[in-house]
Image (spheres, rainbow, N blue to C red):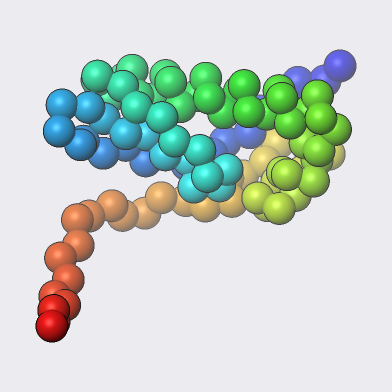
């Protein structure tokens, strides 16, 4: 068995007294009471998700859809987070 390191983007934001962590490549989310807890929980959710996907035999297909390959030894992340900022938009409501 070979171990591969994959790098995903994790975004974390505060909602009330909790922090929500989200991985857009895999469309997975979780939360925590602190930023570190949310980050830890997201890493754990990703690991469990990938393990279960592997058990079902669809891991390679899932990763290919997300832009990853298990055949490459070292892999650059598909996305590089370059900016994160709140955005305000205006809408006209009838």
From this view, report whether residue 37 is shown above or below residue 19. Answer: above
Residue at x-position 68% and y-position 29%:
50
Residue 46, compared with residue 33, is above or below; it is below
Image quadrant of residue 56?
top right
* Residue 81 is at least partly visible in this image: yes
Side of 27 where 61 appears, left or right = right
Is the C terminus in the top left, top right, bottom left or bottom right quadrant?
Answer: bottom left
Q: Is residue 70 visible?
A: no
| Residue 19, horizontal then vertical, whole percent | 26, 30
Looking at the image, which residue is at 61% across and 23% down?
47
Q: Pinpoint residue 55: horizontal percent, then vertical percent.
A: 80, 24
* Quarter of the N terminus within the rendering: top right
Q: Position of residue 42 (x, y in %)?
A: 45, 27
- Please give left or right for residue 91 compared with residue 24 in the image: left
Q: State how many labels appear.
A: 0
Q: Residue at x 52, y 52 (%)?
A: 79
Instruction: Please tell me which residue lies in front, 86 or 77.
Output: 86
What residue is at 41 percent from the left and 29 percent from the top? 30
């Amino acid at each position: 068995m070979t171990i591969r390191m994959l790098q995903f983007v994790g975004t974390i934001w505060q909602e009330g007294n909790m922090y929500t962590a989200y991985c857009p490549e895999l469309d997975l989310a979780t939360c925590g009471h602190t930023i570190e807890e949310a980050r830890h929980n997201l890493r754990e959710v990703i690991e469990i998700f990938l393990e279960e996907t592997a058990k079902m035999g669809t891991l390679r297909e899932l990763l290919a859809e997300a832009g990853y390959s298990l055949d490459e030894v070292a892999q650059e992340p598909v996305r590089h987070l370059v900016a994160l900022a709140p955005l305000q938009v205006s809408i006209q409501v009838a």
